[in-house]
Image (cartoon, coloured by chain):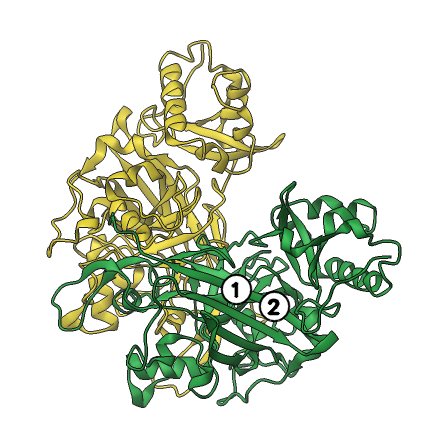
Chain colours: A green, B yellow
Amino acid sequence: MIELRIPDGSDFTLANLPYGIFSTADRSPRAGMAVGKDILDLYALARTGAFDFDPEVFNQPVLNDFIALSKCVTSRARTQVQGWLREGGAGVVRPEHLVPMSEATLHLPVRIGDYTDFYSSIEHATNVGRMFRDPENALLPNWRHLPVGYHGRASSIVVSGTDVRRPLGQTMLPDADRPVFGPSQRLDFELEVAFVIGKESRLGEPVPIAETEDYIFGLFLFNDWSARDIQRWEYVPLGPFLGKSFASSVSPWIVPLEALEPFRVAGPEQDPEVLPYLRTTTPAHYDIDLRVTINDRTVCRSNFRHLYWSMRQQLAHHTSNGCNVRVGDLLASGTISGPGVDAYGSLLEITENGKRGEFLADGDTVTLHGHAGAGSSRVGFGSATGTVQAALNNQP
Amino acid sequence: MIELRIPDGSDFTLANLPYGIFSTADRSPRAGMAVGKDILDLYALARTGAFDFDPEVFNQPVLNDFIALSKCVTSRARTQVQGWLREGGAGVVRPEHLVPMSEATLHLPVRIGDYTDFYSSIEHATNVGRMFRDPENALLPNWRHLPVGYHGRASSIVVSGTDVRRPLGQTMLPDADRPVFGPSQRLDFELEVAFVIGKESRLGEPVPIAETEDYIFGLFLFNDWSARDIQRWEYVPLGPFLGKSFASSVSPWIVPLEALEPFRVAGPEQDPEVLPYLRTTTPAHYDIDLRVTINDRTVCRSNFRHLYWSMRQQLAHHTSNGCNVRVGDLLASGTISGPGVDAYGSLLEITENGKRGEFLADGDTVTLHGHAGAGSSRVGFGSATGTVQAALNNQP
């Protein structure tokens, strides 16, 4: 018989059971599942013969091998664990399989292959377009026809808790005639949710929108740190580059897509109607409350359902040209802004590009939170947090 | 005593000795070195105790573990092999270590982490800017101040010889009021050279330009296939995405940077002067003749030295914000056009966006070639070739 420690309001109820990678003072990184204030050591459990696959998939510093077993296998494993935990361990899960989260270090849970960042919030795209381009035509002509996105940098994605150094970079000051190099003066966060690919597709073969959910293993919070001054100078004509690539932070627990099933909702109406390869009749959005704090002060309350483009549409579009996806690839939503300044998912929008407030200062801690549901049905993401370190003062 | 088969005009002289991954009917992929018409089986050689590192780094389907040993080790290994081969094997390299290239299959030589594509040819950027933006101001204001680049897609990079399927995609026809979905009508190649990162840098720590060569393991040819019609509709404001991500082809042999030392030349003068972090006094360009054929007809003769921005500047800029690089990351040059239409590195430029000729047809074979020097000092890249397959006719 095991005793679960799931306090009221915990993100990690039995309805959730997200996956992560943890280490302890005595043991190297391995797979675990968050259960209240504890981590279920999946490797220890698997070695007792609890599952019908090789326990070694859990004895890895990343979840990729487990995820690659297929959703059929990973989903069944989670349902089994859920059943055992609901019966006090059922003689399968034993007290020694639980590790207090307070004694563990959490790691980046997947080896990320390619990372793509979308731009799928109509409020965010409109706000940005209004500030940087034409206020009368804030949305560019393609925006309502396809989920605009770009490739991001995978190497600099770090797990929650990692400090983020203020980047140096080239910027052009207003009215200057040549650029300068130095610490970014407009450091920002972006509130995003990213999903992890759980199934490989073949090069040259689009994934039909009806099949896209088979490819979505799970989701986590994603802070796409941005240096607005660097970005603004560099981004024409090929898009954001060094203004983004210095760091992105993710929450340590991957919430499996199936845990979010009760929170599935319809998205906003799309007008004009999208092309057939982007059409889906199933509701494909999820009602997930999102919140951002800076030094514990809430600066944004938004919701994942505000996105104009769904994950299904993002993936169908991404593979429509035959581009293949691999296990561990990441597709992020883009900044998730909702209607109204309280729901804006970046300081760029909240401060109107610095007019009504400040960008991030050294020492600021930005934390993203997210959850769906309440009580024993609550499915939470935990948090993605990072503190801004001062820039290097020796320039390269 | 071994007998080398290095015909006149071979790309793979003893001055070159590039690395690749090959398999044979009887043996799985492993590391090799191209020597004339043969491949030196580095794993077989290493198992005789020829080197002072673990032979297993060569018994892998990618070169990453070998490259990660450090340039000091990989460079010495190459110099040793060069010495032995110059002495007829010196009793170390034996006939059974050589495999005829005609009996081998060549594979993608590295597991690519992140792939970045630059835009470093002033002729190319000017030609494209003239066609798609303002002919009077073809170069955007940032272009001469920093090497503009963007993140590309790594999953769809394939080795020379792999067919490339014409992508489907969304395009907006002239004067249409809504986009359509179907096979790209403007399929193009791009003549590029890419370099492979050989040393990890730390997140948050820029690589000073003086140290950048320590991070460059070697180079290969890179064809960044492009669908101009898809690209044109999607690329604002975040840059190229599905117009590029369906495939890129690389030549199978990585030419180590040290083999190119005799061909080092100064680049074009940069005006205005660049910021200090991009300044270097050493000549940092390389005189490498490049050629593109379509169905064996030469359509472009260019040279790697035409680039405005050097590899050193690209890497210094890329890491200037603290973005880390990892072994196996790829940095590609962008299309290498030279002065004059005969030196234009894409059909977009050669045909003036279809006005003076056609884009690629199904069945067309595009091949990139590259080499420096002549005779027994010739250092060649072999080729990167790919044939266009018809688009899928069942749309997703």
* Circle 2 residue: A381
Quarter of the image where one finds residue B26: top right
- Name the mark on residue A395: none
Residue under mark 2: which chain is it in?
Answer: A
Residue at 32% across, 78% down: A357
Label 2 crowd bin: few (<14), some (14–19), many (20+), radius 10 Å? many
Q: Is residue A216 visible?
A: no
Secondary structure at numbered mark 2: strand
Cβ–Cβ under 8 Å for marks 1 and 2? yes
The 10 Å Cα crowd at callout 1, few under 14, some 14 to 19, many 20 or more, is many
As helix, strand or loop, the secondary structure at mark 1 comes to: strand
Residue displayed at 82% across by 54% down: A93
User: Residue B389: percent from the left, percent from the top?
Assistant: 50, 58
Q: Name the residue type under label 2.
A: Phe
Foreground pick, A305 / B63:
A305
Task: Residue at 40% x, 88% y: name it.
Answer: B177
**Quarter of the image with the N terminus of chain A in it:** bottom right
Q: Residue at x 15, y 70 (%)?
A: B137
Q: Position of residue A86 (x, y in %)?
A: 83, 66
- Residue type at the position of mark 1: Ala
Q: Does residue B293 appear anywhere in the picture?
A: yes
Question: Which chain is disc 1 placed on?
Answer: A
Q: Nearer the viewer, residue B393 or B167?
A: B167
The residue pinned by badge 1 equals A384
Task: Choose top left, top right, bottom left or bottom right for residue B214.
Answer: top left
Where in the figure is residue A196, as x and y percent of width and height?
58, 62
